[in-house]
Image (tube, rainbow, N blue to C red):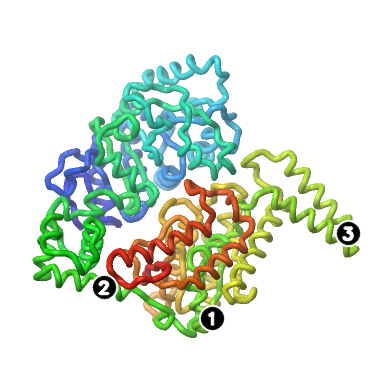
Amino acid sequence: MMKSAPGVVTTPGAAAYDEARDLLSTNRGPSRSHDGDAHARERIPTIVVDQHEDIARLVASRIAAIVRDRAASGRPCVLGLATGSTPIGVYRELIRMHREEGLSFRHVVTFNLDEYYPMPPDSVHSYVRYMWENLFAHIDIDKANVHIPRGDIPRGEVEGYVRAYEEAIRAVGGIDYQILGIGKTGHIGFNEPGSGAESRTRVVTLDMITRRDAAADFFGEENVPREALTMGVATILAAREIAILATGEHKSAIVRRAVEGDIAVDVAATFLQRHPSTTFFVDRAAAADLTRIATPWLLDEVSWTEDLTIRAVVWLSLKTEKAILKLTQRDYAEHHLSSLMAKFGSAGEVNGHVFNALGAKIKGRSKLPEKRRIICFSPHPDDDVISMGGILRKLILNENDITVAYMTSGNIAVFDHDVRRYVDFLVRLARDRKLDVSAIEAMRDRVYGFLAAKHAGDVDIAEVQDIKRIIRESEAISGIETLGLTSGAARFLNLPFYQTGKVRKDPIGPADVAIVRRLIEEQKPDIIFVAGDLSDPHGTHRMCKEAIEGALAAMRADAGGASLSLPDVWLYRGAWQEWPITEATWLVPISQDELRLKIQAIFKHQSQKDSAPFPGQDDREFWQRVEARNKDTAALLDRLGLAEYFAMEAYVVM
């Protein structure tokens, strides 16, 4: 294990968790002091772990210690709580500690950070409902001790209400431990850009980026409220101890800005630099842009591993805008890389080494598997063609036996207007072909009646869910047929965790793992392809990966010491990003014709075309993102001075 500074654990896993937990054993949490240069740019103590589950254990352990300490001294523990996907792991761990370790919340008082406005408390989108579903209903907290900003307060009463909320916090002695997330704008709570350091609980107008981030939960940006009630920056900073959590690659840029950037009113999280006891908890993906992770050679002496060598030379090539083989001794010296050049003896030696290492990653069709058994696990019924349509075509031509396993139905990502269109088609077909019109018209009436009364976020009735599922299944089959597979290659697993009818899913359970395991044991694949996205710890892609890992782990455990042949695991990325060439194991070239065929396969997913229900921050269609991503990967190799290709897909082999 490597501990570079007090309070900052840089090596993840169980050992890191134990050490970090020890560091968090005092009321003030980790020390803010730094004993070396590796963390010199970090103005908030930051703990980096590999697994987001470790963040949950660390934070929940600290909360439990404070709760027990306050109970022992006869004082209530006051917690400031947040919503969103990141804290869910913390709440699940607290529930486990309550059930299995007897952790009591009878003397705990809670204050939530925020709530949309206006927002009825019984709405599926309300933070009142979120908190009771994800925490309060499962522990022994007194309902009178729960405080969540009310989104149903009449406009004329809001000013008095927010003053009363502040007074209620002061009346119990202030917040002992405050949990925060961080938005892409750097907001904490709903303190958007422009929020001042002295701000208190109030109504705020939500930033466009914040509303777009919330669009998936509301089934469209147009349904996201434009305002919210939020604790102010000053309210948050008054807490005795603060934990701010971030997971996923999409948070890496704002994490660096908050931790290493100057305090600024346009990034509210930077005000935490002034707090005497704030700790940032991030997974490796969210920490990727921190200087000590991205470019550690700029801060301190490093041990030049193969991975770090490749990263440094690629960084230098892009920084100087020179091809790798044209980098000079002066380039290395001027960019704090003299020690790397010294290790190899000359600039030419290190240049050649990295050039050859990158070239060895390129894997054309002749170097790809032939006549093997392969399962492509696709979280949704389009991730296969979006993410790996190029390599799928090559693997088909190489006569591999391929199964595409669609892990979820993807039915929530189908617009209601598509349902109406298909139902209308069925009615017209029944009338023209003299089928059982009455049964189909009865279904039409139920479906149309439900859709007419439906509100954004309402769970679809069974008929609507089935129609949406079948739409996605038929599109998936059409997509793989475009690449050269038959309909028999498709397997629709419909994992139970997804079948909530809501954006937020259940945790991965034994039933999900069992379904995946049965398929692996039935097919006995040599290779499996798995979505390796790290953007959202509770997103469908990451949860599907968890189910696959659970199945493989169970197979290993049941085998004991016996010989067991498990498949190789190739990780691909989804529609949102590609593996960096420095991390990729293989770079698979795609010709112009192959990219065109891949895009045609994506086009078969008509329900996701033109305007996808969950577009994220990128307005482009999926095929446009894919085209740009695959071409950009190839163009990057060209900039580095390697061979020029039309497009490329990247994969990591575990």
Q: Which residue is mark 3?
A: 431
In this view, 623 is above or below 26: below
Measuring from the top left, give residue 238's x and y in whole percent: 31, 25
Q: Which of 366/263 is in front?
A: 366
Measuring from the top left, give residue 391's x and y in whole percent: 47, 73
Residue 192: which quarter of the image?
top left
Q: Nearer the viewer, mark 1 or mark 3?
A: 3
Measuring from the top left, give residue 109's x and y in whole percent: 42, 28
Which residue appears at 55% of the width and 32% of the height? 225
Which residue appears at 88% of the width and 59% of the height? 431
Q: Mark 3 falls on what kind of element?
A: helix
Q: Nearer the viewer, mark 2 or mark 1?
A: 2
In this rendering, does residue 514 appear at all?
no
Q: Mark 1 falls on what kind of element?
A: strand
Distance from Cα at disc 2 to Cα at disc 3: 64 Å
Q: Which residue is mark 1?
A: 401
The answer to the question of whether label 1 and label 3 lie on touching residues, with beta carbons closer than 8 A, is no
Distance from Cα at disc 2 to Cα at disc 1: 31 Å
Q: Which of 60/183 is in front?
A: 183
Whichever of callouts 2 and 3 sits on the residue coming sooner in the sequence is: 2
Distance from Cα at disc 1 to Cα at disc 3: 42 Å
Is residue 509 toward the left or the right of residue 289 in the image?
A: right
Q: Which of 428/104 is in front?
A: 428
Residue 359: which quarter of the image?
bottom left
Whichever of callouts 1 and 3 sits on the residue coming sooner in the sequence is: 1
Q: Residues within 10 Å of mark 2 (few under 14, many from 20)?
A: some
Which of the numbered marks, if any, corresponds to residue 357?
A: 2
In this rendering, does residue 493 appear at all?
yes
Q: Residues within 10 Å of mark 1 (few under 14, many from 20)?
A: some
Q: Which of 511/260 is in front?
A: 260
Which residue appears at 28% of the width and 55% of the height? 12
Quadrant of the snapshot with the C terminus: bottom left
